[in-house]
Image: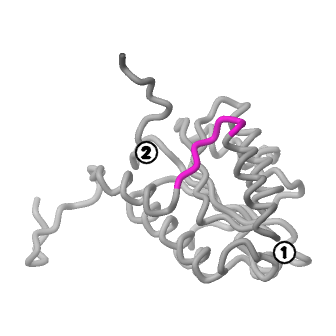
Amino acid sequence: MRSQVLHGRLTPINCSLILINFQTSLLSTITSIAPKALIGNAIDLARIANLLGIPTVLTAIGLKSYGGPFLPEFLTMFSNQEPIECTTMSVWEDRRVSREGERTGRRKLVVAGLWTEFCVGLSTIQAIESGYAVYVVGDACGDLTSRAQDAALRDIIQAGAILMECGQVLTELQQHKPLSVPEVHPSGVQKS
C-alpha cells in the first residue's frame, strides 16, 4: 500500500517567504529560543530566498512604538522594500500582505517570525483557510515562553501547517537550481 504524500517539496519557484515582525523590541521579549540562534536561522532563510529570487514579504507591527525598528540585517538584504506595517496580530488579515501572496501565484508559504502564539499562529491558520500550504520554520520563530511556543506549534500543526526546521527548508530549496542563477565552476569561472 502506498503512503499518501502530505506535501510536495519546496522549490524556489513554488513558494514565497513571509518574515513576520523581526523587530528589535519584540526580539527582546523572546525566551523560547536563544535570540542569536533564532535570528541566525531567520537570516539564513532570508539569504537563500534572496539568492534564489523567492518572493519575500517583510511585516512589522508598531514600528515607531512597542515593536521597535525592523532588524537591519533584513532591511539590507531586501533594500528595495519596506516592511508592511500591520495593525492586527494576523498579518494575513492585512490585505497588502495577502495580496502579495496572491500576486506571486505561489500556493506554498514559508513563514517565520516573532510571537508564534499570536502573529505567526493566527497568520498561518488564516493563510491555510485561504487555501495555502503553509510551512512554519519552528526554529526561526520565537515566543514569550517555551510553553506558548509549544502550544502555538501544536495548534498550527493541527490546523494543517507543515512544521520544519531551518536546515530542512534550506536543503529542499538548494536541491533546485533556478534558471536565473548562473552555474559557477569551482575555478570561479561562470559557465554559459
Task: Check the picture and name the quadrant holding the N terminus.
Answer: top left
- The amino acid type, in three-letter code, at marker 1 is Gly
Residue 14: percent from left, percent from top:
45, 41
Give above or below for 47 relative to 13.
Answer: below
Q: Which mark is residue 13?
A: none
- Residue 162 sits inside the magenta stretch: yes
For the image, the number of numbered tags is: 2
Give above or below for 11 relative to 25.
Answer: above
Residue 75: percent from left, percent from top:
61, 76
Instruction: For marks 2 and 1, give the one nearer the viewer.
Output: 2
Give the structural element (helix, strand or loop) at label 2. loop
Q: Quadrant of residue 131?
A: top right
Instruction: Give the distance between the C-alpha atoms of the residues marked 2 and 1, in whole angstroms.
Output: 31 Å
Q: Looking at the image, is mark 2 or mark 1 earlier in the sequence?
A: 2
Direction front: furthest residue: 1
Residue 65: percent from left, percent from top:
91, 77
Residue 74: percent from left, percent from top:
59, 74
In the picture, measured across the screen, residue 67 lies left or right of residue 132, that is: right
Q: Which residue, given by chain and number where applicable, does mark 1 sit on? A: 67
Give above or below for 158 relative to 94.
Answer: above
Q: Which residue, given by chain and number where applicable, does mark 2 sit on? A: 10
Q: Residues within 10 Å of mark 1 (few under 14, many from 20)?
A: some
Q: Residues within 10 Å of mark 2 (few under 14, many from 20)?
A: many
- The residue lying toward the viewer, choosing from 159 and 27, is 159
At x 84%, y 74%, the residue is 67
Give the structural element (helix, strand or loop) at label 1. loop
- The amino acid type, in three-letter code, at marker 2 is Leu
- Residue 160 sits inside the magenta stretch: yes
Residue stretch in magenta: 158-164
At x 56%, y 57%, the residue is 56
